[in-house]
Amino acid sequence: MKRSKALKINNKKRIIEPLALSKAKHYLMLIACIILLESLSAKAQENVLSSKISIELKNISIEKALSLIEKKINYNFTFDASLVNSKEKVSLHFKNRTVSKCLDSIFFDKELIYTVIDNHIVIKQKAVKFIEDLPKDTLNKNVEIRGKLIDIETNEAVPFATVSVKNYSIGVISNLEGEFILKIPSNLINEDLLVSHIGYENLIDKIHSFQNKYSLFYLKQSFVPIQEVVIRNTDAKTLLRLALNKIDENYGTKPNYLTAFYRETIKRGDTYMFFSEALLQVYKSEYSSTYEQDQIKVLKSRKMKNVTLRDTVVLKIKSGLQSVLFLDVVKTRIDFLLEENFHLYNYKMADIVTYNDKTSYAIDFEQKGGTDGELYMGTIYIDTDNLAIVGAEFQINPRKIDKAQSRFVVKKTRGMKLRLLDTKYIVSYRSSNGKFYLSHVRGELKFKVKKNNKLFPIIFDTVLEMAVSDIDSSQVVKFSRKEAEDLSDIFADVQHKYDETFWEEYNFIKPEDSWQEAIKKIHEKMNLKDF
């Protein structure tokens, strides 16, 4: 099922109440209970999959066969619709066979694995080992794949999808128009191209099929066939507690370098006022550390300012680089992921969906009525297999958005009244060698600006976005003070040397056509040649 929700974030504060001694004892007991639950879960998994059953299946669909087995073992099956044709007929007779062997026979010649989570068995495709490092001599010999992602039913563009080389840490994110440009080393031309997006079936095809041409990729919405009783009986807060308890197990336990593309834009109505993009190297400390220890080094950057507009309102994003690091919500533990703040939110199991190639619980949350302050609402996605938090989409409570306006520090001209209208935030993670790493973050703010001497207000849209294209775990050290960026700076005002030849060999997020046209017009007016 396709899920698209708005998102939002607090750059300055987290609500944390002090723990009394009795409360601390309560948490110790809770941790003990979690450990016990995990132990019992492991035993349950071993027992139910190794338990033996006898059943006869005569020319019935796989869906019906699984339903009959469910009644025998008192467990429910969950699987991605793209993995199995549930309408396919089977005729099998099992006598005193283990559940896992029965499933192997039903899903003949399919490489699937079975994992028990609570009272249901999750059927997944076997993981393929992730290859992280590429030969250095291939980095400058690129093949370019261009295309657009389209929903096969609605014919609408699919934005913010991940397009990558399967089993390699090379990828890019589609833009608002669903378009992308992916540059890969030429020695990977015979590998598979993988397109994934929440609520859609994965699309996999050979890279060489799309070389040197513009292709349309049609994505089909994915529905996970799971009984509603499974969703109703799964406690959202229990899942969140288990996921938080497994952060050290599921995420990086040592520092890493992330190679990432960063973009920052400000649009006034339909015209881009400012556009900046950069290739970054991010020093990402282990996830048990706080986010202040992360660093960013700008490798290359380029910027555009539209100075041709007269009587314009000046609006700038402050601390953009710091904001994209803060959007790593698993690392920073934003307040809706802090157990101390669970009492401020309502959490509920909403669905089980496909999220970036992972079957995931979708947990909706919102600020409780009567609570003070401006908090959040949105959706958290948790991998059903290992309970890793694989993504989140959230926003500031629209009913209290006026109170949140002071959070977003902007530079503005005199005589200007500014009102925050909307915020949207997305963060997603992807796995590499059994660990999850930050993959993509995007933040959007919408402002209404009114100047004292103007009759009509102006709408400004600001966007921050960072897409990780590579991960390196070898010989990782912190940057020197001279190399690291000051994360509190306004990126628009920091000067970096422009390298015209550099951008041809690196992946980036393809600009929307409206941006391309805006840049073209500005260049014509300003006679610019260096961008």
Image (spheres, rainbow, N blue to C red):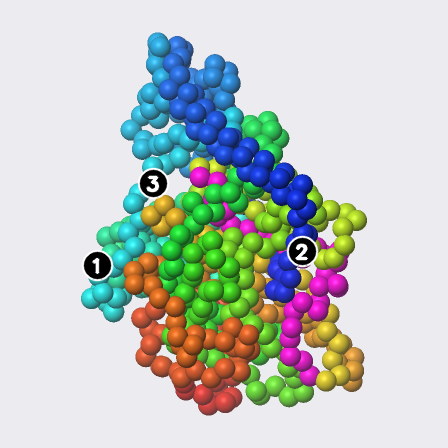
The residue where tag 2 is placed is 15
- Residue in the foreground of this view, choosing between 111 and 340: 340
Tell me which segment is drawn in magenta.
386-413
In the image as oriented, which residue stretches furthest toward the bottom? 527
Query: What residue is disc 3 on?
Result: 127
Does 311 appear above or below 166? below
On the image, the x and y values in percent for residue 332 come to 54, 57
Q: CA distance from mark 3 to mark 2?
A: 38 Å
Residue at image x 45%, y 24%? 44
- Which quadrant: the C terminus? bottom left
Answer above or below: position of 481 versus 71.
Answer: below
Q: Quadrant of residue 457?
A: bottom right
Nearer to us: label 1 or label 2? 2
Q: Does the image show residue 283? A: yes
Does 507 appear above or below 119? below
Residue type for callout 3: Ala
Provide the secondary structure element on which disc 3 rests.
Answer: loop
- Image coordinates of residue 139 in percent, x first then y, are 25, 66
Q: Hey, which quadrant is residue 261 in on the image?
A: bottom left
Instruction: Name the disc covering residue 187, or none.
Output: 1
Split into 4 quadrants, where in the image is the N terminus?
top right
Does 104 sit left or right of 290 as displayed? left
Q: How many marks?
A: 3
SS under mark 1 = helix
Q: Residue at x 62, y 39 (%)?
A: 25
Q: Amino acid at mark 1?
A: Asn
What residue is drawn where x is 61% and y is 46%? 339
Disc 2 is placed on an element classified as loop
Magenta stretch encompasses residue 395: yes
Q: Nearer the viewer, residue 310 or 8?
A: 8
* Crowdedness near tag 3: few (<14), some (14–19) or many (≥20) residues, C-alpha within 10 Å: few
Tell me which label, 3 or 1, sits earlier in the chain. 3
